[in-house]
Amino acid sequence: GDPELDLPPSPHPLRPVQLEEVRAHGRFGVVWKGIMTDQVVAVKIMPFKERSSWMTEQEIYKLPHMKHDNLLAFIGAEKREENLWLISVFHEFGSLSDYLKGNTITWSELCKIAESMTNGLAYLHDEIPVARGLEGKPSIAHRDFKSKNVLLKDDLTACIADLGLAIKFEPGKSPGETHGLVGTRRYMAPEVLEGAISFNRDAFLRIDMYACGLVMWELMSRCSGSDAPVEDYQLPYEEEIGSHPTLEDMQELVVMKKIRPSVKDHWIRHAGLEALIPTIEECWDQDAEARVSADCVHERLLQIGRTLNV
Ligand code: ADE
């Protein structure tokens, strides 16, 4: 092949970005670590055919009140030659999924990650009403919540990334384009797998909560809090259906058999992990209306973290 094609795209003359190395591959493109002036940045480079995801992500980030400690900080969006770029703050640890692959976590680290992650999700879901001429923030559903889309900052708090499938709900307005079957198969709620979702705000927020329960399970499965040895990192349902489940595999497992990731026996020998079990089960309830909200999970985590400082 042409060796030129393997080179990173040339930096823009006005906002020079030096691309250093590829850090992640996603469905929508490749994430590079780069240097912009004196700042380390993450650059998501997407092919032109992913322009709707590129547009959505920047539109969501540009909404009022979208700066929050537990949401990835957006820097800018650009068209460069053939590609579409999304530039954000860089986090050395990368995604929660990558971190759990390489590291176990203590109980206090679990509390910190889960608390900050649900704080970010609760904030995304929350509506800030317009008041006295001040701008509001619509309620936003993520629609691709998973451990790969949660990043860990240097202090091991979480921030939520990848808003390319997100939708906003403005009071009195229709959310626009809403076909149901989006997201990552493994993390799809039963009603999504069934193709049976109603297109209202609460239905979408509950779909995020199902996925949030799976991510909490991933955290618990890598927690060194109890006496038992910690098993190698596995994605949710990896034990049950392996690495490349088809839609049919997921439907059979999650919709028909109503299977969920296994709650480990040793968790009940750790007061903190034990206290979290009902909450993850309420996140992934088959009945979407029975699921807990992100704000409720966040409150419970604060409570459990305070009382069970084990
Ligand atoms: N992977 C995806 N986005 C990232 C970011 N902002 N920083 C580090 N790794 C990432």
Image: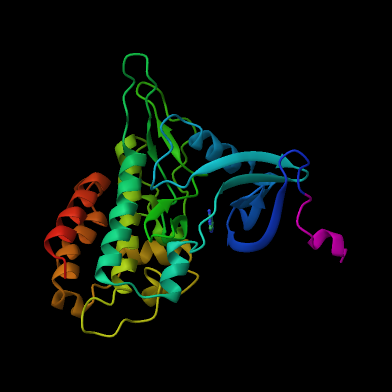
Where are the magenta residues, as a range? Answer: 1-10
125 to 307, vertically: above or below: above
Q: Is residue 123 left or right of residue 154?
A: left
* Residue 257, x across and y down, in percent: 29, 66
Residue 308 position within the rendered picture, expressed as x and y whole percent measured from the top left = 13, 65
Position of 128 relative to 219 (above/below): above
Q: Say left or right for 301 vs 251.
A: left
Q: Is residue 257 visible?
A: no
Residue 191 percent across, percent down from the top left: 34, 50
- Quadrant in which residue 20 is drawn: bottom right
Residue that appears at 33% across and 35% down? 201
Image quadrant occupied by the C terminus: bottom left
Question: Does residue 8 belong to the magenta stretch?
Answer: yes
Q: Is residue 177 magenta?
A: no
Q: Is residue 197 above or below residue 218?
A: above
Quarter of the figure with residue 127? top left
Q: Nearer the viewer, residue 178 or 96?
A: 96
Q: In the image shown, does 55 or 110 lie closer to the viewer?
A: 110
User: Is the residue 154 above or below the residue 290 in the image?
Assistant: below
Q: Between residues 61 and 142, which one lies in front from this camera angle?
A: 61
Would you say residue 45 is visible in this rendering?
Answer: yes
Expressed as whole percent of the image width and height from the top left, the position of residue 278 reads 16, 61
